[in-house]
Amino acid sequence: MLRAVSFDVFESEIVSLIGESGSGKTTMLRIIQGLIKADAGEISVGGAAIRGPGYDRGIVFQQANLLPWRTARSNIEFGLELKGVGPEERRTRADELLGLIGLTEFAHQYPHQLSGGMQQRVGVARALAIDPEILLMDEPFSALDAQTRELLQYELLRIHVQTRKTILFVTHDLDEAVYLSDRVIVMGTRPGHIKAVINVPFDRPRPTLTEMRGNAAFLELRDHIWQQIRPESQGVSR
Amino acid sequence: MNAAELEAAPIDAGDALARRKRRLTIIRVSSIIVAFGCWEIFGRQINPLFMSYPSKIVVGAITLMQDGVLQTALVESLRTLVLGYVGGALVGVTAGLLVGRYREVEAATDWLINALYATPLVALIPLVILWFGLGFQAKLFIVFLFTLFPVLINTSIGVKNVSRSLIDVAVAFVANERQIFSKIILPASLPYVMAGLRLGIGRAIIGMVTAEFFTAISGLGGLVVKYGNNFRTDEMLVPVLILMGLGVLLTGALQRAEQLIAPWKTNEHND
């Protein structure tokens, strides 16, 4: 499904993988997380080659995938619990993260009592709880409505400023990719491959996406990337 | 977003719902009163051999209790029921977890489980008698068998229905097999396990009465046979009604436990 894909993500950087469905961007992310085994190739985090899942990587899924029988706090504690961290430390860490995502008052709510946006925030906190080297995000906001998505994108940048986590972000939303990233990796299909790597030069902290859309340079860059994706899309529809 | 509006809507809906519920309760209670009233009135016209009526059954129950017959039978029955049910439930849940989780175990056993589940277990009672005799052990084994299958099958379905994405979460956070089992599969399949236990209790009561009919006659089932054979219909109906009550009570209790243990499941449907 993927062939000759190679790229680096640097510390504290946000890199987006973008491409149409079938370009293997989600597969890529799952391989990095260790949920799928690659037939060949090598992935390393901080110099150490990875074999299977590990606490150096934290993943946020497309659907929040919270455990429905656990409260928000307990969901955040999940990874720490598996890691064998004691209850007091878990609780402190979870409370910190609940503060970071602005859901302190919802600590005792169950997932079905939370909105989609809140659930996904808890998903982010759960991944951050294990203090990974890199945060892997698999189209985390794609199931949310437009306003909530924009709010969470902005929140993610705020969290990034506070935590300085390296983030690898899979998306099919071009605006989202450009808005969030330092670099955008454009992937093509059949087999999945890297078509282009594009630097996004905008200063941080960035304003909201709506404001960024009023910026000519943003639109120009967005258009430029669109050109990279487009030829293949047209080929498919013909 | 207008929070006040959002909050107002469900409260109105809740009010209407409460009103409708109250109306249905009134209908239900009146239906019970009318049914028992008719039974009392028309039951008296029928030959007492074929039917009895509520007040006479109550009198019969008091007589049986004064003699201590009813208490003895109830204790006997409950002992078989509780021990057989607990045994069947424990084995059923354990086996169900294994069958549901491991394809190999399933392949090795599903034909047998399906075959036995489809067999009317009453047909096996003569065999059980050959193995265990007519006493307590035979009854215990029959209740065990009756309980086992619904619990086992429900549990294994529950395990198989655990969403792949929840297991992925555990794997991504580096869970080992034991942790996947205890932290994902067990809680996720709990609602199914509880449903199996609830079905199992009904089956266990059937098993108990069947056993009391066909092995050494004893317990509540024994009373039904004994008074039936003696044409004492009013007294015969006492253990029948107690069995009915027992079934309703235990099933209801397990349903309640289901809501307490797996509140996220019931709430999902209410939202």
Image (spheres, rainbow, N blue to C red):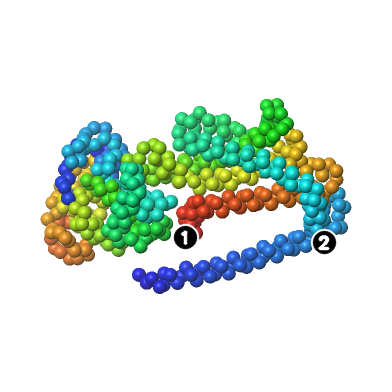
Identified at 63% across, 65% down, the residue is B24
| Secondary structure of the residue carrying numbered label 2 | helix
Q: Tag 1 or tag 2, which sits nearer the N-term? A: 2
Give neighbour class at mark 2: few <14, some 14-19, many 20+ (Cα, 10 Å): few
| Secondary structure of the residue carrying numbered label 1 | loop
Q: CA distance from mark 2 to mark 1?
A: 46 Å
Give neighbour class at mark 1: few <14, some 14-19, many 20+ (Cα, 10 Å): few
What is the quadrant of the N terminus of chain A in the image?
A: top left
Identified at 52% across, 41% down, the residue is B155
- Residue B196 image point, x, y percent: 56, 44
- Residue B270 image point, x, y percent: 49, 59
Judge left or right: residue B140 versus residue A156.
Answer: right
Judge left or right: residue A165 versus residue A74.
Answer: left
Q: Which residue is mark 2?
A: B41
- Residue A20 image point, x, y percent: 26, 48
- Compared with B271, A126 (above or below) is above
| Camera-side residue of A109 and A44 | A109
Judge left or right: residue B54 versus residue A168.
Answer: right
| Camera-side residue of A42 and A79 | A79
Identified at 64% across, 64% down, the residue is B25
Q: Are marks 2 and 1 on the same chain?
A: yes
Res A71 visible: yes
Q: Name which residue type carries label 2.
A: Ile
Q: Name which residue type carries label 1.
A: Asp
- Residue A12 image point, x, y percent: 17, 50
Q: Which residue is mark 1?
A: B271
| Camera-side residue of A5 and B147 | B147
- Compared with B222, B107 (above or below) is above
**Chain letter of disc 1 in the image:** B
